[in-house]
Amino acid sequence: MPEMLRGDISQVPLPDVLRLLVGSRQTGRLDLLDGASAGAIYLESGTLIHAVNGAQMGEAAVFSLMAWQEGGFSFVPDQAAPEESISTSTDHLLEEGSRKAREWAEVMRALPGLDAVFRLSPSGSPSGVSLEPNEWQVLAQVDGARDVSDIADALGWDDFEVASVLARLVTGGLLDCEQGRESDLAPTLDSVFLKRLDAEFLDIVGPLGPAIVDDEIATMRETKESFPLARTAELIERISADIADDEKRIGFQRIMLNVLRSL
C-alpha cells in the first residue's frame, strides 16, 4: 500500500476504504473532510479502535462517517490513537456501517441535502393522514429555516433519525423541501384554520380551550393576526400536550393536520 492513501468518497465509498485498510492490517489515522465537516478513524493492526466526528465519538462516529456520500479522505500511517473509544468488533462495525450507509443513500434520494429546509406542503390529499409520535416531534420543529442538523440538535437525535423521518414526510407529500433558507416574508396562517383550531379544542377541553390556544401563541411570541404558517405544526403539538387522553390527542392532531392540508 502507498505511504499515503488519498481519494474521494464519491468515487470510493468509505466502507470500501475501511475494508482495504482492515484487510491489510494497517495502523494509522484515516482523515475525512467534507467542507467544514471533519472526522477521523484510527486503526491498530487492522482493528478500528477510535473515531471522532464533531461531537460524536466511538461507534456512533464510525456510523455517521460511513454514511458520508462525498468528501475527501487521506490515510496517514503509523499515527497512534489518542484514546480507545471503540469496543465493538471491527467486523460488526463494517457490516452495520455498510447497512446504515445504504439506508442513508435511500433517505437522501428524497432530500436535496442535509442543508435543505422544510415547510408544510400546500398540495396533496389530506385524507388518511396519520402521524407517529416521532413524526410529530420532527414536524413540530419544521419552520422553513431549520435544516436536518438544526432539527436533530433541537431534539437531541442524530442526523440519520431526523433525515429518515423528514424523508418519509416529504415522500408522503406532507412537506416540501429545498436548498437554502426561506425568505423573511414567510406566509402566515389562514384565519379559517385558527377559528377551526379554537372550535376543535373547545370541543375537547371545554370553555378554556380558546384561552389555552391564545396562551400558547403568546408563549411562542406570535399573534393570531400574523402567525407564521411554518410554525403551525409546533403550535398543534404544544396544544396537544394539554389533552390527557391519548386517543383524543391523536384524533385532534389528525383533524387539524387534515384541515391545514385542505386550505
Image (cartoon, helix red, strand yellow):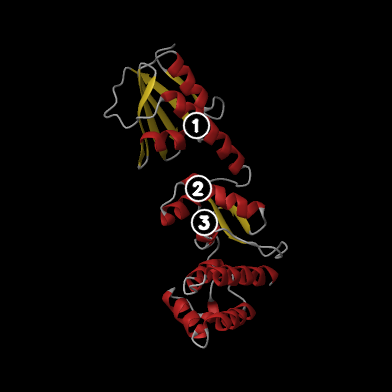
Q: Do the residues labelled 3 and 1 touch (CB within 8 Å)?
A: no
Density class for disc 3 (Cα within 10 Å; few <14, some 14-19, many ≥20) is few
Please say if 96 is above or below 162. Answer: above
- Residue situated furthest bottom in the rendering: 207
Density class for disc 1 (Cα within 10 Å; few <14, some 14-19, many ≥20) is some
Which residue is tagged 3? 134
Say which amino acid is labelled 1: Glu
The answer for how far apart the CA atoms under marks 1 and 2 are is 16 Å
Density class for disc 2 (Cα within 10 Å; few <14, some 14-19, many ≥20) is some
Q: Which image quadrant is residue 83 in?
A: top left
**Label ID, residue 161:** 2
Which x, y percent locates residue 67?
51, 36
The answer for how far apart the CA atoms under marks 3 and 1 are is 23 Å
Q: Are marks 1 and 2 in contact (CB under 8 Å)?
A: no
Residue 136 appears in the figure = yes
Q: Report whether 49 appears left or right of 137.
A: left
Which residue is tagged 1? 96
Which x, y percent locates residue 252?
59, 72
Say which amino acid is labelled 3: Asn
Which residue is painted at 54% across and 33% down in the image? 99
Quarter of the rendering occupied by the N terminus: top left
